[in-house]
């Protein structure tokens, strides 16, 4: 006789899925990797430094595979593809989070090397990450590009970095149209100021000044970004594609 009062465990949101998160050795992407595993996915994470990658894998604890890969290096991307193909043979969720920021760099200070370095990872690297993993993407899968609210703000000294994030916004629109026949959704997740290691190393008064500019009067937390990444990765967003979803406490919205 079946016990009508017996509770069944709810299905996790990414049960049995395979996710790839690039640049996930710290901060927002690492928080997303932890949450994806909790929600039932096997997650492949990448990082450029083996020691940081090993630490992240250990911190996540299970259902994770670390692949040393520099998103700006096409050969490293090939190694990532080979690892996923050998391990699971498919990708259900691709979160392209690898990127590099810049200190304030006025237009007069931009060099060919600094331009090529930032665009090489943030824009070129993102495009070829998606292109190379696309043959393994499941129909109905989700691609998330890690943007930033800076692309629409016109912040002095951020012309190159902001332009790379504007490129991702354009990529998402085009790829959402190109991949719609396969049911693959492509969206941008654009964080605002978030309490990661980069901000943690700044003086308290600077953090307070930044928080004061945000309508919700606080910095974002990596968990705030991870929860929105889960939304875009899961069937909760099954009718959402081609958008730029700002997670910024209202900073760029109000």
Image (cartoon, rainbow, N blue to C red):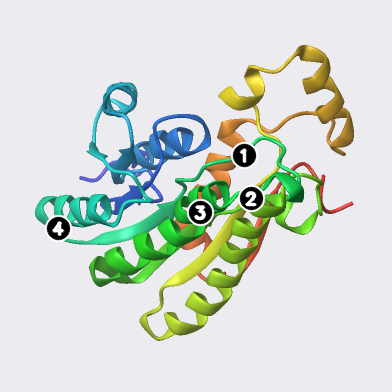
The answer to the question of whether label 3 and label 1 lie on touching residues, with beta carbons closer than 8 A, is no
Q: What mark, if any, has residue 85 been given in the picture?
A: 4
Residue at disc 2, secondary structure: helix
Disc 1 to disc 2: CB gap under 8 Å: yes
Q: Which of labels 1 and 4 is toward the front?
A: 1
Image-based side of 50 in relation to 117, left or right: left
Residue sitting nearer the eye, 189 or 69? 69
**Pointer 1 residue:** 102
Picture layout, residue 141 above or below residue 60: below
Instruction: Return the disc, 4 or 3, that comes first in the chain's sequence.
Output: 4
Q: CA distance from mark 4 to mark 3?
A: 30 Å
Residue at image point 25% right, 49% down: 76
Residue denoted by label 2: 161
- Give SS at disc 3: helix
The disc label shown at residue 116, or none:
3
Tell me if residue 210 can be seen. yes
Residue 6 in sight here: no
Asked if 221 appears above or below 140 in the picture, the reply is: above
Residues 151 and 172: in front is 151
Q: Which image quadrant is residue 181 in?
A: bottom left
Please give the name of the residue rendered at 40% of the width and 78% of the height, measured from the top-left corner: 183
Q: Quadrant of residue 82?
A: bottom left
> Which tag, 1 or 2, sits closer to the chain's start?
1
What x and y, as percent, mark residue 21? 38, 47
Position of residue 91 measured from the top left corner of the image (x, y, whole percent): 27, 60
Please give left or right for residue 229 compared with residue 2 in the image.
Answer: right
**Camera-nearest label, 3 or 2:** 3
Residue drawn at the location 12% of the way across and 50% of the way down? 87
């Amino acid at each position: 006789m079946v016990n009508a009062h017996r509770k069944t465990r709810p299905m996790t949101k990414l049960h049995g899925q395979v996710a790839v998160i690039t640049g996930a050795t710290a901060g927002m992407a690492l928080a997303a990797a932890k949450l994806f595993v909790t929600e039932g996915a096997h997650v492949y994470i990448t990082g450029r430094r083996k020691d940081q990658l090993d630490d992240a894998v250990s911190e996540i604890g299970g259902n994770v595979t670390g692949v040393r890969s520099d998103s700006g290096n096409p050969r490293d991307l090939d190694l990532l593809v080979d690892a996923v193909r050998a391990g699971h043979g498919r990708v259900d969720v691709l979160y392209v989070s690898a990127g590099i920021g810049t200190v304030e760099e006025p237009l007069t200070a931009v060099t060919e090397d600094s331009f090529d370095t930032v665009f090489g990872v943030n824009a070129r690297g993102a495009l070829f990450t998606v292109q190379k993993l696309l043959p393994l993407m499941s129909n109905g899968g989700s691609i998330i590009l890690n943007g930033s609210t800076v692309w629409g703000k016109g912040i002095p000294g951020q012309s190159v970095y902001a332009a790379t994030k504007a490129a991702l916004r354009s990529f998402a629109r085009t790829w959402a149209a190109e991949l719609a026949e396969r049911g693959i959704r492509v969206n941008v997740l654009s964080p605002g100021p978030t309490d990661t290691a980069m901000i943690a190393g700044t003086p308290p008064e600077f953090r307070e000044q930044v928080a004061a500019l945000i309508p919700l009067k606080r910095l974002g937390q990596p968990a705030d970004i991870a929860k929105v990444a889960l939304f875009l990765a899961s069937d909760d967003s099954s009718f959402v594609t081609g958008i730029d979803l700002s997670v910024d406490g209202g900073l760029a919205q109000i």
